[in-house]
């Protein structure tokens, strides 16, 4: 938990600097590579537990600059994600690491074959 807290703290610092919530940084990180050469259109669909969170997600930061994307990549390089990829609800026991998040090129999420 302490290892992942370091990553969260660094993302919180970036969010504070931009004047947005950390979730908005996360959504912008997913959206920003969308449509770049060689990449597909990416449409994040966040889950929310309250109507206030839905509104917060809709207001999100549309795009991050290349410098901000590089900053997030550096944060992920410094702070390997450790632990279960889902809550202990039994949905998954798959271990995850920052390489799963970064993908082979250091900034993209690998596409999912969700049909099967």
Image (tube, rainbow, N blue to C red):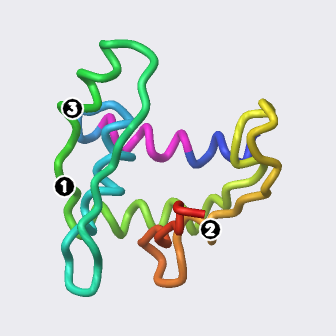
89 lies above or below 38:
above
Q: Quadrant of residue 65?
A: bottom left
Q: Where is residue 54 in the image (x, y as percent from the top left)?
A: 30, 23
Q: Is the residue marked by circle 1 packed among few (<14), some (14-19), or many (20+) residues within 10 Å?
A: some
Q: Quadrant of residue 35?
A: bottom left
The quarter of the image holding the C terminus is bottom right
Q: Quadrant of residue 37?
A: bottom left
Q: What element carries label 2?
A: helix
Number of disc labels: 3
What residue does disc 2 label? 100
Can residue 19 be found in the magenta stretch?
no
What residue does disc 1 label? 63
* Sequence-earlier tag: 2 or 1: 1
Give the spatial CA distance, label 2 vs label 1: 22 Å
Q: Are marks 2 and 1 in contact (CB under 8 Å)?
A: no
The quarter of the image holding the N terminus is top right
Comparing labels 1 and 3, the label whose residue is closer to the camera: 3
Give the spatial CA distance, label 3 vs label 2: 26 Å
Magenta part of the protein: which range? Answer: 8-16
Residue at left offset 54%, top offset 83%: 104
Can residue 12 be found in the magenta stretch?
yes
Q: What element carries label 1?
A: loop
Q: Where is residue 87 in the image (x, y as percent from the top left)?
A: 73, 34
3 to the left or right of 113: right
* Sequence-earlier tag: 1 or 3: 3
* Sequence-earlier tag: 3 or 2: 3
Q: Position of residue 95 (x, y in %)?
A: 79, 57
What residue does disc 3 label? 58
Comparing labels 2 and 1, the label whose residue is closer to the camera: 2
């Amino acid at each position: 938990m302490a290892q992942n807290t370091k990553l969260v703290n660094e993302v919180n610092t970036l969010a504070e600097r931009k004047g947005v919530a950390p979730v908005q940084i996360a959504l912008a990180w997913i959206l920003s590579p969308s449509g770049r050469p060689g990449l597909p259109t990416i449409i994040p669909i966040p889950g929310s537990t309250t109507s206030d969170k839905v509104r917060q997600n809709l207001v999100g930061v549309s795009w991050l600059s290349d410098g901000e994307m590089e900053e997030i990549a550096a944060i992920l390089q410094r702070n390997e994600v450790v632990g279960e990829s889902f809550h202990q609800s039994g949905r998954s026991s798959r271990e995850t690491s920052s390489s799963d998040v970064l993908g082979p090129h250091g900034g993209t999420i690998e596409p999912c074959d969700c049909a099967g």
